[in-house]
Image (spheres, helix red, strand yellow):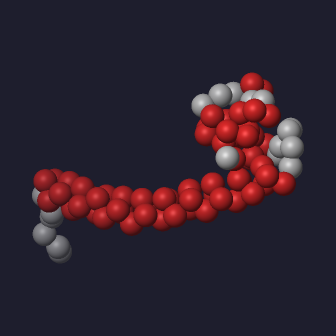
Amino acid sequence: MADRMSTASRMDRARDNAAISRAVNGALKRKERASRDKRMAELVKKGSLPYIPSVMSWLSVKLNKPASQITAEDVKKVVS
């Protein structure tokens, strides 16, 4: 039978694994955010208000406004 691992050792291992996971996943997330920003900006340039829900959600986050309050002037600021 295997020896039992102490709680402190398990917590240390979990903390170390979480740090590694954050480093790896953080880089992937930054890359995906950049590609999403590029993709959404292209969709905004092609269309006009009202946009599809995913674009409106993205604009809402970028402008820090509810989607219902977004105007054409706000969109121009984001795309420019």
Query: Residue 57's image quarter?
Result: top right
Instruction: Reply above or below: 66 against 5.
Output: above
- Measured as percent of width and height from the top left, residue 22 is found at 36, 58
- Measured as percent of width and height from the top left, residue 30 is found at 48, 59
- Residue at image coords 63%, 34%: 63
Residue at the far top: name it.
Answer: 69
- Residue at image coords 63%, 54%: 37
**Label tally:** 0
Query: Residue 2's image quarter?
Result: bottom left
Residue at the far bottom: name it.
Answer: 1
- Measured as percent of width and height from the top left, residue 80 is found at 67, 46
Query: Residue 77's image quarter?
Result: top right
In the displayed structure image, the side of residue 48 where residue 26 appears, left or right: left
- Residue at image coords 71%, 53%: 41
From the viewer's side, name the closer residue of 10 and 26.
26
In the displayed structure image, the side of residue 22 where residue 44 appears, left or right: right
Quadrant of the frame with the N terminus: bottom left
- Residue at image coords 43%, 64%: 27
Instruction: Reply above or below: 20 against 75.
Output: below
From the viewer's side, name the closer residue of 66 and 41.
41
In the displayed structure image, the side of residue 78 where residue 11 appears, left or right: left
- Measured as percent of width and height from the top left, residue 62 is found at 61, 39
